[in-house]
Every structure is written in structure tokens, then in C-alpha cells.
Image: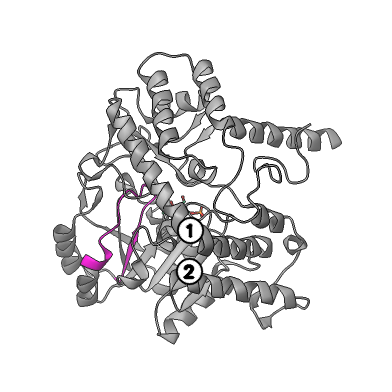
Amino acid sequence: MAQTVERVRDAVRRHSARFERAIPLIASENLLSPYAKELLVSDLHSRYAEGLPGERYYEGNEQVDEVETLCLDLAKRLFRCSFADVRPISGTVANFAVLKALAEPGDLVGTCRLADGAHISSASFGAFGVRGVKPVYYAWDPERMTIDVPRTKEILREVRPKLCLFGLSLFLFPLPVQELSSTLEDVGARGWYDAAHVLGLIAGGEFQDPLHEGCVVLSASTHKTLPGPQHGILLGNTEDPELTKRLASAAFPGVTSNHHLHSMAALAVSLAEHLAFGRAYARQVIANAKALGAALHERSFDVLGEKLGFTASHALAVRVTTEGGGEEVARRLAAAGIIANKNLLPGDTSPKRPGGIRLGTPEVTRVGMTEKEMVRVAELMDDLLHRGKRPESVAADAATLKSGFTGLRYCFAAGEAAYRYYDLVGHPPP
Ligand SMILES: Cc1ncc(COP(=O)(O)O)c(C=O)c1O
């Protein structure tokens, strides 16, 4: 068995070495800061703390209480809101908590279609299906890559859902929460925002501010544009004690038991770092995404959202039907050291044949890349997909580009020598 352990460790080392040489463009991924990563392997990983600070079911939780209280205060400060719960252990779990708190089986819940960018939480085979709620789909404007407000108002007035979810996995532009909020009020629906992808942009003040535009609750992952640990969060801006009570009891004991204290502590660090560096980071993430979109467009890629500057977020959608389709293009890019994912795009009819790829700039920005490097990334993609350059040769160019970015930015203790972010903690490759 010792050999098996070595095989696992070796596979992880090879994975890390691969990512160290690559250009990671997965829109939902990011890198943890040194202080946050340190806490992930702390003793908190071994402990339980069910309940809330001061009201635990176990002993030995005094310091955990201190950490969680800080984490909740930081979250409320960062998002200027009155309610936070950091017990959901992922974005999907946070979504389950909202559905448990605010909907009953059989209820109608507004959302976007998967092909328009919604997350699988809204699918019948995802959280919606598990809770037994029925989706009501908003109308979509494919040119502006957002919800079509006039047609959606009509749908909401006719169908009168109980809850309306605003959130996407392919999130290019802000959603019209404010524009729809009076209709939600008229039909008696509550607004719910899934900020898994754009949490760090919202916190940085560079996207939209759903909790101040009409949503009563926000659920999210904490590891995408917010460069924190893999975890989840619930935030609310309501004075209604009944609502916050329902959300809190949906988080625990509804959808979690122990809430992964090590990652909760890492989240506290990431929230504090985002208060210090989040605005600058969010700005550069978006500037990089816009620059990459423009550079790809100049090289004849079909980047969606052209009339609106391609994106107002961290993400881009590129239709690659002429280059071989989403699946083949994502695979060829990975072989050339550029990591992205195939993605359904509006108008795609088969979920098995996505017409596009999704690109994101959270990680490349975190290591310090700026607009200049985005142009180089577009050149590499052009070389591979339009000019017939061999994947090994593009991979070598990608590694050369990446070798200039060995430090992390936008966090404390970001020194280059002190921390190799792709290493196993304490066990650098030989
Ligand atoms: C919009 C949206 N919500 C929820 C999630 C799920 O997040 P997690 O992976 O933290 O469960 C994702 C994941 O990508 C997402 O895109």
C-alpha cells in the first residue's frame, strides 16, 4: 500500500507541475493565498463544530468560534449586508440551502436555461430536481447575453413563480435584477442571486450589487473570482428574522453537519485579503477578460457579446464550430498547455455537442498577467487553431510565457521565493 500512496503523491506532483507550465483559463478556478492554504492543513481539519459560535454541540470550539465570528463579520463588511452564513461547504450546497429555506416541492422557480448559461443546480437532474421545484425559464437576449427584460416581465406576470434565481455559470454581463425587482414584488416572488462565479467581482465593486438591487439572498462558491478555499456562503440583506432563521436552519442542520472548519478559516483569510486587494484584483480580472476577447476577435475567433465589448466579467464565450466544436477545441488546447472547457452556448441543441468554449481570467490575473499577456495568449490560440502550429510547440510557448509569472498577487505574503503555489504544501517536487 505504501507504493499506492507514492503513486497518488506522484500523480498530484505531476498535476501540479503541469499546471505550473500551463495557462489555466477555467473561469471557475483560482489559486489560494499562502496564509489561506496554510490553514487548510491546520488542526481545524480534524475537528467538528456543529451549530453557531457560542451555541455548539461539541466542546473545544472556543477558537473555532473566534474564527467563525471573524469570518461572518468580514463577510458582512465586504458585502455590506446584515446576514451571513459560512456553513455551506460549496456553492451547490448553498443553493440547496436556499431551495430548502425558500421553496417547497412543486413550487415554480424562475431561472435561465442551461444553454443560456445556467448552472446544473437549476436542472431537473440537479438541485431543482432534488427539491422537486419546477423551473420557469426567463426569456434570453443572445445578442446582449443577458435576460430579455420585457419578455421576462410578461412571463413572470403570467406564471407568478415563488422564487426567482439570478445566476449563471457562463456569466458575461450583469443580470437585470434591478429592472425586474418591481415585477418580482408585484407577483410576490423573492429574488435569489447565485454569485458563484462573480462573487469576487461583486465584492470588488466592479460588477453588480444584487443584495442592494432587490435580491433577499445570495448563495455562492468562494473559490472562483473570490480567490478563496473551496467552500460556500449565504448572504442576505433582510431584516426579516423569520427569513434569516429559515436560511440558517437550512444551512445547519438542513444541508450540512460539520462545516469544514479548515476551509472556513481559510475563507476568513481570503475575505480579509479581498477587503485589502479585491477592488484592484476585480478590475484587472475584467480588464484582462476584455483584452483577451478583443485579441481573439482580431484573430477571427467568434467571441460572443461583440457589441458590448465581449464581457463585463471574468469570462468569455467563444463559438468554435468552425474550429471543430467545443469538445475537440478544448481537448486540443489542453494538449497545447491552455486549459479551458467546452461549453454550451445559446442556440446549441444537443448538450452532448457544445458549440463553444468558456475562457476565464481569474487565475492568470492572480499570478500577475495583464492585458499584454492576454494578447500573447490569443496568439498562442491562433497559432494552434488557425495556423496549424503543433501542440507540443504551442505548449512550449505557453510554458515560456508562464515562467515569467511565478508569484501570486493580491494577497499578503505574496513573495515569490516564499511560496510556490502549485506545490504540495511542505513537499516541493524533488
Ligand atoms: C452558477 C454556479 N452555481 C453554483 C456552482 C457550484 O459551485 P460548487 O462547485 O462550489 O458546488 C457553480 C459551479 O461552477 C456555478 O457556476
Task: Respond yes or no on whether mark 1 lies under 8 Å from ligand 1.
Answer: no
Observer-nearest of 368 and 134? 368
Q: Position of residue 299 (x, y in %)?
A: 30, 25
Q: Is residue 197 visible?
A: no
- Name the image quarter holding the C terminus: top right
Relative to 15, 164 lies left or right = left
Crowding at label 2, few (<14), some or many (≥20) Cα neighbours within 10 Å?
some
Relative to 14, 214 lies left or right = left
Observer-nearest of 97 and 85? 85
What residue type is disc 2 on?
Leu
- Name the image quarter holding the N terminus: top right
Q: List the residue tagged with mark 1.
A: 278
Crowding at label 1, few (<14), some or many (≥20) Cα neighbours within 10 Å?
many
Observer-nearest of 9 and 136? 9
- Decide which of tag 1 and tag 2 comes sooner along the chain: 2
The quarter holding residue 44 reads bottom right
Colouring used for the render: one colour
What residue type is disc 1 on?
Gly
Q: Position of residue 188 (x, y in %)?
A: 25, 77
Q: List the residue tagged with mark 2.
A: 78
What's drawn in magenta, residue-wise? 162-179
Q: Are marks 1 and 2 in contact (CB under 8 Å)?
A: yes
Dot in front, 1 or 2: 1
Q: Position of residue 5 (x, y in %)?
A: 80, 38
Q: Position of residue 209 (x, y in %)?
A: 35, 66
Residue 341 sits above or below residue 274 on the image = above
Residue drawn at 40 percent across, 25 percent down: 379
How far apart are the two marked residues, 1 and 2, measured between alpha carbons? Answer: 10 Å
Residue drawn at 35 percent across, 58 percent down: 207
Residue 121 sits above or below residue 244 on the image = above
